[in-house]
Amino acid sequence: MKPVLYTYIQKDQLEKLLKCLHCCLELPVSALDENGEVICGFGTPLPFCICFQKILPRYSGGEDPCHKLHADAGRRAMKSGNPFIFSCHANLSHLIFPLNSGRQQLGSILVGPFVTEEPSPDMFVDIAKRYSPEARDLLELYEKAKHIPLITPEKAEQCSWLISYIFLPFLSSNASVPQEAPQNGSRETAATDSGKGTDVIQSAITYMQQHFDSPITLKETADYVELNPSYFSTLFKQSCGSSFKEYLNYIRIEKSKKLLTTTDSSILDIALSIGFEDQSYFTKVFKKYTGLTPKQYRS
Protein backbone atom coordinates (compact mmCIF):
# COMPACT_ATOMS: atom_id res chain seq x y z
CA MET A 1 0.00 0.00 0.00
CA LYS A 2 1.26 3.47 -0.89
CA PRO A 3 2.43 5.43 2.20
CA VAL A 4 0.15 8.34 3.12
CA LEU A 5 3.19 10.61 3.10
CA TYR A 6 3.46 10.22 -0.69
CA THR A 7 0.15 12.06 -1.11
CA TYR A 8 1.92 15.17 0.24
CA ILE A 9 5.38 14.78 -1.21
CA GLN A 10 6.59 12.84 -4.24
CA LYS A 11 8.96 9.94 -3.74
CA ASP A 12 11.82 11.54 -5.67
CA GLN A 13 11.38 14.79 -3.70
CA LEU A 14 11.51 12.90 -0.42
CA GLU A 15 14.65 11.08 -1.47
CA LYS A 16 16.34 14.33 -2.52
CA LEU A 17 15.51 15.96 0.82
CA LEU A 18 16.75 12.96 2.80
CA LYS A 19 19.96 12.86 0.77
CA CYS A 20 20.45 16.58 1.44
CA LEU A 21 20.00 16.04 5.18
CA HIS A 22 22.34 13.06 5.17
CA CYS A 23 25.07 15.00 3.35
CA CYS A 24 24.73 18.07 5.59
CA LEU A 25 24.42 16.25 8.92
CA GLU A 26 26.76 13.37 8.03
CA LEU A 27 24.40 11.06 9.88
CA PRO A 28 22.12 8.22 8.76
CA VAL A 29 18.68 9.62 7.88
CA SER A 30 15.48 7.67 7.20
CA ALA A 31 11.82 8.41 6.51
CA LEU A 32 9.29 6.21 8.31
CA ASP A 33 5.69 5.76 7.22
CA GLU A 34 2.59 6.14 9.40
CA ASN A 35 3.19 2.64 10.84
CA GLY A 36 6.82 3.28 11.70
CA GLU A 37 8.16 1.28 8.74
CA VAL A 38 11.17 2.59 6.80
CA ILE A 39 10.20 4.10 3.42
CA CYS A 40 13.67 5.16 2.32
CA GLY A 41 16.90 6.36 3.83
CA PHE A 42 20.52 7.32 3.31
CA GLY A 43 23.62 6.29 5.23
CA THR A 44 25.11 2.90 5.95
CA PRO A 45 24.88 1.19 9.36
CA LEU A 46 27.65 2.19 11.74
CA PRO A 47 30.35 -0.47 12.29
CA PHE A 48 29.49 -0.24 15.99
CA CYS A 49 25.85 -1.12 15.26
CA ILE A 50 26.83 -4.07 13.05
CA CYS A 51 28.98 -5.39 15.87
CA PHE A 52 26.31 -4.74 18.50
CA GLN A 53 23.72 -6.68 16.49
CA LYS A 54 25.79 -9.81 17.15
CA ILE A 55 25.07 -9.67 20.89
CA LEU A 56 21.57 -8.15 20.87
CA PRO A 57 18.95 -10.86 21.46
CA ARG A 58 16.07 -11.04 18.98
CA TYR A 59 12.47 -10.84 20.13
CA SER A 60 10.29 -13.93 19.94
CA GLY A 61 9.46 -14.58 16.31
CA GLY A 62 12.80 -13.14 15.20
CA GLU A 63 11.76 -9.47 15.21
CA ASP A 64 14.67 -7.04 15.16
CA PRO A 65 14.68 -5.07 18.46
CA CYS A 66 16.22 -2.01 16.76
CA HIS A 67 13.53 -1.97 14.07
CA LYS A 68 10.80 -2.26 16.70
CA LEU A 69 12.32 0.52 18.82
CA HIS A 70 12.55 2.87 15.83
CA ALA A 71 8.99 2.09 14.73
CA ASP A 72 7.65 2.65 18.26
CA ALA A 73 9.51 5.97 18.46
CA GLY A 74 8.07 7.06 15.11
CA ARG A 75 4.52 6.26 16.20
CA ARG A 76 5.02 7.98 19.56
CA ALA A 77 6.41 11.11 17.87
CA MET A 78 3.43 11.28 15.51
CA LYS A 79 0.98 10.80 18.37
CA SER A 80 2.56 13.51 20.52
CA GLY A 81 3.28 15.81 17.58
CA ASN A 82 6.68 16.64 19.07
CA PRO A 83 10.22 15.62 18.09
CA PHE A 84 12.44 14.09 20.76
CA ILE A 85 15.76 12.34 21.28
CA PHE A 86 15.70 8.74 22.47
CA SER A 87 18.31 6.12 23.36
CA CYS A 88 18.58 2.74 21.66
CA HIS A 89 19.51 -0.59 23.24
CA ALA A 90 23.20 0.34 22.96
CA ASN A 91 22.63 3.75 24.60
CA LEU A 92 23.19 5.59 21.31
CA SER A 93 21.00 8.62 20.65
CA HIS A 94 18.51 9.15 17.80
CA LEU A 95 16.38 12.13 16.84
CA ILE A 96 12.82 11.42 15.72
CA PHE A 97 10.76 14.16 14.06
CA PRO A 98 7.01 13.68 13.41
CA LEU A 99 5.43 14.48 10.05
CA ASN A 100 1.79 15.36 10.67
CA SER A 101 -0.72 17.41 8.70
CA GLY A 102 -3.30 18.70 11.10
CA ARG A 103 -4.48 15.60 12.95
CA GLN A 104 -3.38 13.20 10.21
CA GLN A 105 -0.25 11.21 11.04
CA LEU A 106 1.90 10.84 7.94
CA GLY A 107 5.22 9.49 9.15
CA SER A 108 8.45 10.65 10.75
CA ILE A 109 12.09 11.42 10.08
CA LEU A 110 14.71 9.37 11.96
CA VAL A 111 18.23 10.75 12.37
CA GLY A 112 21.04 8.77 13.96
CA PRO A 113 22.56 7.01 15.72
CA PHE A 114 24.99 9.40 17.39
CA VAL A 115 26.35 10.18 20.84
CA THR A 116 26.01 13.46 22.71
CA GLU A 117 29.29 13.01 24.59
CA GLU A 118 32.39 10.88 24.16
CA PRO A 119 31.70 7.20 24.98
CA SER A 120 32.84 6.41 28.51
CA PRO A 121 33.84 3.08 30.10
CA ASP A 122 30.45 3.11 31.86
CA MET A 123 28.78 2.57 28.49
CA PHE A 124 30.58 -0.75 28.02
CA VAL A 125 30.09 -1.78 31.64
CA ASP A 126 26.36 -1.33 31.09
CA ILE A 127 26.42 -3.33 27.85
CA ALA A 128 28.37 -6.11 29.57
CA LYS A 129 25.83 -6.25 32.42
CA ARG A 130 22.78 -6.36 30.17
CA TYR A 131 23.94 -8.63 27.34
CA SER A 132 26.91 -10.63 28.70
CA PRO A 133 28.93 -10.49 25.45
CA GLU A 134 32.11 -12.46 24.95
CA ALA A 135 35.30 -10.55 25.71
CA ARG A 136 36.30 -10.31 22.04
CA ASP A 137 32.91 -8.82 21.09
CA LEU A 138 33.12 -6.24 23.88
CA LEU A 139 36.63 -5.30 22.79
CA GLU A 140 35.43 -4.92 19.20
CA LEU A 141 32.60 -2.67 20.37
CA TYR A 142 35.10 -0.53 22.26
CA GLU A 143 37.19 -0.08 19.10
CA LYS A 144 34.18 0.64 16.88
CA ALA A 145 32.80 3.22 19.36
CA LYS A 146 35.63 5.57 18.42
CA HIS A 147 33.89 6.16 15.08
CA ILE A 148 30.37 6.95 16.36
CA PRO A 149 29.41 10.52 15.30
CA LEU A 150 29.45 13.02 18.17
CA ILE A 151 26.58 15.52 18.12
CA THR A 152 26.08 17.95 20.99
CA PRO A 153 22.53 18.40 22.38
CA GLU A 154 22.60 21.95 21.03
CA LYS A 155 23.41 20.72 17.51
CA ALA A 156 20.70 18.07 17.78
CA GLU A 157 18.20 20.85 18.52
CA GLN A 158 19.32 22.75 15.44
CA CYS A 159 18.94 19.54 13.39
CA SER A 160 15.33 19.36 14.54
CA TRP A 161 14.73 22.97 13.54
CA LEU A 162 16.33 22.33 10.14
CA ILE A 163 14.05 19.35 9.53
CA SER A 164 11.01 21.47 10.34
CA TYR A 165 12.00 24.09 7.78
CA ILE A 166 12.67 21.45 5.12
CA PHE A 167 9.61 19.24 5.51
CA LEU A 168 6.73 21.13 7.10
CA PRO A 169 6.07 23.42 4.11
CA PHE A 170 5.29 20.28 2.07
CA LEU A 171 2.76 19.00 4.60
CA SER A 172 0.47 21.93 5.35
CA SER A 173 0.20 25.63 4.79
CA ASN A 174 -0.72 25.80 8.47
CA ALA A 175 2.33 23.85 9.61
CA SER A 176 3.88 24.90 12.87
CA VAL A 177 7.09 26.51 11.69
CA PRO A 178 8.91 29.33 13.47
CA GLN A 179 6.90 32.53 13.16
CA GLU A 180 7.69 36.20 13.58
CA ALA A 181 7.65 37.61 17.07
CA PRO A 182 4.78 39.91 18.12
CA GLN A 183 5.37 43.43 16.90
CA ASN A 184 5.16 45.13 20.28
CA GLY A 185 8.56 46.76 20.59
CA SER A 186 9.53 44.48 23.48
CA ARG A 187 12.73 42.52 23.85
CA GLU A 188 10.98 39.54 22.22
CA THR A 189 10.77 41.42 18.92
CA ALA A 190 14.27 42.82 19.21
CA ALA A 191 15.76 39.41 19.92
CA THR A 192 14.16 37.80 16.88
CA ASP A 193 14.58 40.68 14.47
CA SER A 194 18.27 41.06 15.26
CA GLY A 195 18.95 37.35 14.88
CA LYS A 196 19.65 36.86 18.58
CA GLY A 197 16.74 34.54 19.31
CA THR A 198 19.04 31.52 19.17
CA ASP A 199 21.42 33.15 21.67
CA VAL A 200 18.54 33.75 24.08
CA ILE A 201 17.44 30.11 23.87
CA GLN A 202 21.03 28.94 24.30
CA SER A 203 21.26 31.00 27.49
CA ALA A 204 18.05 29.38 28.69
CA ILE A 205 19.41 25.89 27.94
CA THR A 206 22.62 26.63 29.82
CA TYR A 207 20.55 27.80 32.78
CA MET A 208 18.50 24.58 32.63
CA GLN A 209 21.63 22.44 32.53
CA GLN A 210 22.94 24.22 35.61
CA HIS A 211 19.70 24.01 37.63
CA PHE A 212 18.07 20.77 36.41
CA ASP A 213 18.33 19.28 39.92
CA SER A 214 16.11 21.97 41.43
CA PRO A 215 12.35 22.56 40.93
CA ILE A 216 13.08 24.87 37.98
CA THR A 217 10.05 26.30 36.17
CA LEU A 218 9.36 27.78 32.76
CA LYS A 219 8.58 31.17 34.35
CA GLU A 220 11.82 31.14 36.32
CA THR A 221 13.82 30.43 33.17
CA ALA A 222 11.88 33.01 31.16
CA ASP A 223 12.61 35.59 33.85
CA TYR A 224 16.30 34.68 33.67
CA VAL A 225 16.45 35.48 29.93
CA GLU A 226 14.08 38.45 30.40
CA LEU A 227 11.26 37.17 28.20
CA ASN A 228 7.53 36.98 28.70
CA PRO A 229 6.80 33.35 29.82
CA SER A 230 4.18 32.79 27.11
CA TYR A 231 6.43 34.08 24.36
CA PHE A 232 9.43 32.23 25.78
CA SER A 233 7.46 28.97 25.69
CA THR A 234 6.60 29.50 22.01
CA LEU A 235 10.11 30.57 21.04
CA PHE A 236 11.66 27.64 22.92
CA LYS A 237 9.53 25.07 21.12
CA GLN A 238 10.13 26.70 17.74
CA SER A 239 13.89 26.76 18.34
CA CYS A 240 14.34 23.35 19.97
CA GLY A 241 11.53 21.31 18.48
CA SER A 242 10.33 20.31 21.94
CA SER A 243 8.61 21.98 24.84
CA PHE A 244 10.45 23.41 27.84
CA LYS A 245 9.27 20.53 30.06
CA GLU A 246 10.21 17.86 27.51
CA TYR A 247 13.70 19.27 27.11
CA LEU A 248 14.17 19.61 30.87
CA ASN A 249 13.11 15.98 31.30
CA TYR A 250 15.60 14.98 28.58
CA ILE A 251 18.42 16.66 30.50
CA ARG A 252 17.36 14.96 33.73
CA ILE A 253 17.03 11.51 32.15
CA GLU A 254 20.48 11.75 30.57
CA LYS A 255 21.94 12.62 34.00
CA SER A 256 20.04 9.76 35.64
CA LYS A 257 21.37 7.22 33.14
CA LYS A 258 24.91 7.96 34.25
CA LEU A 259 23.96 7.76 37.94
CA LEU A 260 22.19 4.43 37.42
CA THR A 261 25.28 2.84 35.89
CA THR A 262 28.00 4.48 38.00
CA THR A 263 26.52 4.57 41.53
CA ASP A 264 24.70 2.29 43.94
CA SER A 265 22.22 5.01 44.91
CA SER A 266 18.60 3.92 45.15
CA ILE A 267 16.26 4.81 42.30
CA LEU A 268 14.35 7.09 44.67
CA ASP A 269 17.52 8.96 45.66
CA ILE A 270 18.49 9.36 42.01
CA ALA A 271 15.02 10.63 41.12
CA LEU A 272 15.14 13.23 43.88
CA SER A 273 18.72 14.25 43.07
CA ILE A 274 17.86 15.17 39.47
CA GLY A 275 14.76 17.21 40.24
CA PHE A 276 11.87 14.72 40.22
CA GLU A 277 9.48 14.84 43.17
CA ASP A 278 8.77 11.12 43.34
CA GLN A 279 10.03 7.80 42.02
CA SER A 280 6.81 6.87 40.22
CA TYR A 281 6.84 9.88 37.91
CA PHE A 282 10.59 9.50 37.33
CA THR A 283 10.06 5.89 36.26
CA LYS A 284 7.26 6.90 33.89
CA VAL A 285 9.37 9.61 32.23
CA PHE A 286 12.48 7.41 32.11
CA LYS A 287 10.60 4.65 30.28
CA LYS A 288 9.12 7.19 27.86
CA TYR A 289 12.60 8.35 26.83
CA THR A 290 14.49 5.04 26.91
CA GLY A 291 11.91 2.28 26.53
CA LEU A 292 13.10 0.75 29.82
CA THR A 293 12.36 1.29 33.51
CA PRO A 294 15.28 2.56 35.63
CA LYS A 295 15.54 -0.89 37.22
CA GLN A 296 15.71 -2.63 33.84
CA TYR A 297 18.26 -0.10 32.61
CA ARG A 298 20.49 -0.71 35.64
CA SER A 299 20.24 -4.51 35.70
Image (cartoon, rainbow, N blue to C red):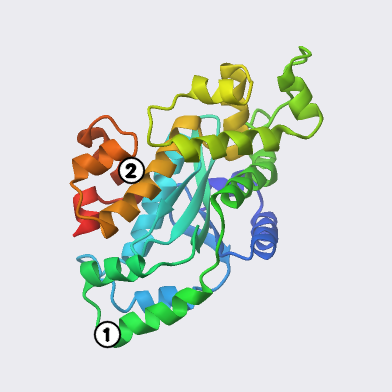
Q: In the image shown, does 29 or 231 lie closer to the viewer?
A: 231
Q: Secondary structure at mark 1?
A: helix
Q: What residue type is disc 2 on? A: Lys
Q: Does residue 156 appear left or right of residue 272 in this picture?
A: right
Q: Position of residue 231 (x, y in %)?
A: 62, 20
Residue 35 seen by the camera: no
Q: Earlier in the sequence, mark 1 or mark 2?
A: 1
Disc 2 element? helix
13 lies above or below 50: above
Total residue callouts: 2
In the picture as drawn, the residue positioned furthest to the right comes out as: 194
Residue under the image location 49 percent in, 49 percent down: 96
- Residue type marked 1: Ala
Q: Position of residue 131 (x, y in %)?
A: 23, 71
CB contact under 8 Å: marks 1 and 2: no
Q: Quickly name the residue at label 1.
A: 135
Query: What numbered label is drawn on residue 288?
Result: 2
- Where is residue 88 shown, x and y percent of the image? 37, 59
Q: Is residue 65 above or below residue 147?
A: above
The vertical placement of 130 against 170, above or below, is below
> Residue drawn 22% across and 68% down?
129
Label 2, residues with CA under 10 Å away: few <14, some 14-19, many ≥20: some
Residue at image point 50% right, 47% down: 107
- Quadrant occupied by the C terminus: bottom left
Figure quadrant of residue 127: bottom left
Pointer 1 local density, CA inside 10 Å: few below 14, some 14–19, many at least 20: few
Which residue: 33% across, 52% down?
A: 257
